[in-house]
Amino acid sequence: MSISTGPIRDLKESIPNITWGTARLRLPAQIYLHIAGSAEPLRMKLNRSICLGRTDNESVVEIDVDLTPYKAAEKGVSRRHMMLELAQETVSLTDLGSTNGTFLNGQRMQPFQRRIVRDGDEIRLGKLVVHIYF
């Protein structure tokens, strides 16, 4: 998996003909996660699945995207908080039994419930707000 950052103004320029709100992810599967308060989005390829969460000194957890630099612990992000998965050109989101919950467009998800994500959706992990673009 490749993760990089870039200025948010380049987001629209780098993806021509964006259809906001679509549930279809065109291949190659590249997504952008814009974390509230951050100037630059996280840009990554989504091959199958990625786990988002945070690290700490007490335990060793396997995650693909570490949200610790975004004050994840203070905002209630669990060590293994949520999973994004690619299947049949759509992206789905699953809460991994997080302590403070995952919200999709303001609606709290049930633990281990899978929901389809659309371009421009708001995902909240505890109190950490993320917008997803593809």
Image: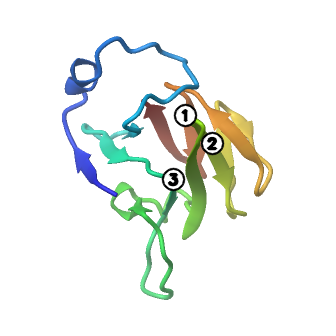
User: Can you identify the residue that label 1 sits on?
Assistant: 89
In contact (CB < 8 Å): disc 3 and disc 1: no
| Horizontal arrangement in the rendering, residue 113 relative to residue 28 (left or right) | right
Q: Describe the element under mark 1 as helix, strand or loop.
A: loop
The answer to whether residue 89 is above or below residue 98 is: above
- Crowd tier of the residue under label 3, counting other residues whose Cα lies within 10 Å: few below 14, some 14–19, many 20 or above: few
Question: Residue 107 placed where, x, y %?
Answer: 73, 35
Cα separation, mark 3 vs mark 2, equals 10 Å
Cα separation, mark 3 vs mark 1, equals 10 Å
Quadrant showing the C terminus: top left
- Where residue 33 sits, quadrant-wise, is top left
User: Can you identify the residue that label 2 sits on?
Assistant: 92
| Horizontal arrangement in the rendering, residue 10 relative to residue 108 (left or right) | left
User: Can you identify the residue that label 3 sits on?
Assistant: 48
Amino acid at circle 3: Arg
Question: Residue 75 placed where, x, y %?
Answer: 52, 56
The answer to whether residue 55 is above or below residue 46 is: below
Amino acid at circle 1: Glu
Amino acid at circle 2: Ser
